[in-house]
Image: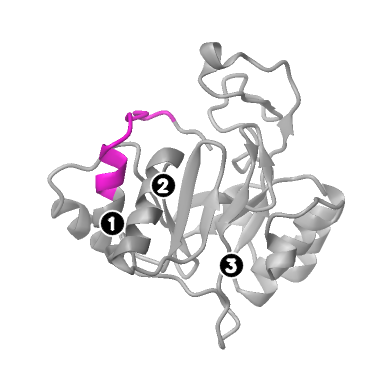
């Protein structure tokens, strides 16, 4: 599995193969994202991060190459025929996971905070599930949660930085080996597949406290979305 979804040289069908693993073996609903478009790179001083442009109609797209467009998010599926058709027609399309309901949810935070959080989890002996790394953020996949559960956990916190984001029902995150406008998406910690044939996912409550503390220790990016 690490060979299929880990860090390796991209082939023409790498995204299609990864999408089929997610959809048919793991039961994760996926769909293709809108592809990034090559453009003149801004300097780090101008933009803060090198970014490509998006193929969607919005010239100011905040998440180039990392969001659904056509098809929309509601089209996410585990159907092998549809998944194969999508990525045969668009082999370079980013791979998106539709989060929530029975699918994995996610928590994301700035990359610097994510590195601190993973080091703290290791120190405490807390097991994490799959962790996605983009040039700007870390995304931790967790077991499904609902809004009521999320609200109770956040209410118990004195303050939650806006840079820590929660991806539940109606949300999405890019999966490896996608390439977005911000750059390559990789597994920082690849999925660990158990006897049931699906990746193990931690409960959100086992991670929130550390993620809140780690996010508070790095500059807050505010409401701006970026992957």
Residue extent of the magenta highlight? 212-224
Going from N to C along the chain, the mark reached first, 1 or 3, is 3
Quadrant housing the N terminus: bottom right
- Asked if marks 3 and 2 touch (Cβ < 8 Å), the reply is no
Q: Is residue 223 above or below residue 91?
A: above
Describe residue 220's horizontal placement relative to residue 47 as left or right: left
Indicate the position of residue 59 as horizontal and vertical percent values.
Answer: 62, 19
Q: Helix, strand or loop at disc 1?
A: helix
Q: Is 49 in front, or is 169?
A: 49
Circle on res. 28: 3
Sequence order check: which comes first, mark 2 or mark 1?
Answer: 2
Which mark is in front, 3 or 2?
2
Q: Quadrant of residue 66?
A: top right
Q: Main secondary structure of the magenta part?
A: loop
Residue behind mark 2: 114
As for residue 222 lying within the magenta part, the answer is yes
Identify the residue at horizontal 78%, vertical 58% (top origin).
Answer: 16
What whole-number distance in Å separates the C-alpha atoms at marks 1 and 3?
A: 23 Å
Label 2 crowding class (10 Å Cα cut-off): few <14, some 14-19, many 20+?
many
Q: Callout 2: helix, strand or loop? A: helix
Identify the residue under disc 1.
208
Residue 120 at what x, y percent from top left?
Answer: 32, 56
Q: Quadrant of residue 182?
A: top right
Q: Nearer the viewer, residue 40 or 99?
A: 40
| Left-right relation of 150 to 57 | left
Question: Could one spot residue 77 in this view of the protein?
Answer: yes
* Image coords of residue 218 (percent x, y): 32, 34
């Amino acid at each position: 599995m690490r060979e299929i979804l880990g860090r390796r040289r991209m082939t023409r069908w790498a995204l299609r193969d990864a999408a089929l693993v997610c959809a048919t073996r793991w039961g994760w609903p996926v769909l293709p994202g809108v592809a990034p478009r090559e453009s003149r790179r801004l300097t780090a001083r101008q933009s803060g991060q090198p970014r490509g442009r998006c193929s969607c109609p919005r010239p100011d797209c905040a998440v180039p190459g990392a969001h659904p467009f056509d098809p929309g998010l509601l089209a996410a599926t585990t159907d092998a025929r549809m998944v194969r058709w999508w990525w045969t027609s668009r082999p370079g399309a980013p791979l998106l996971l539709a989060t929530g309901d029975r699918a994995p949810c996610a928590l994301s935070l700035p990359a610097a905070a994510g590195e601190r959080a993973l080091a703290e989890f290791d120190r405490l002996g807390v097991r994490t599930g799959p962790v996605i790394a983009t040039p700007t953020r870390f995304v931790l996949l967790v077991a499904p949660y609902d809004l009521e559960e999320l609200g109770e956990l956040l209410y118990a916190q004195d303050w939650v930085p806006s840079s820590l984001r929660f991806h539940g029902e109606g949300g999405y995150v890019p999966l490896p080996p996608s390439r977005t406008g911000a750059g390559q998406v990789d597994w920082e910690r690849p999925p660990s597949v158990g006897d049931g044939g699906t990746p193990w996912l931690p409960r959100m409550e086992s991670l929130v406290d550390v993620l809140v503390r780690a996010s508070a220790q790095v500059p807050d990016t505010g409401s701006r979305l970026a992957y």
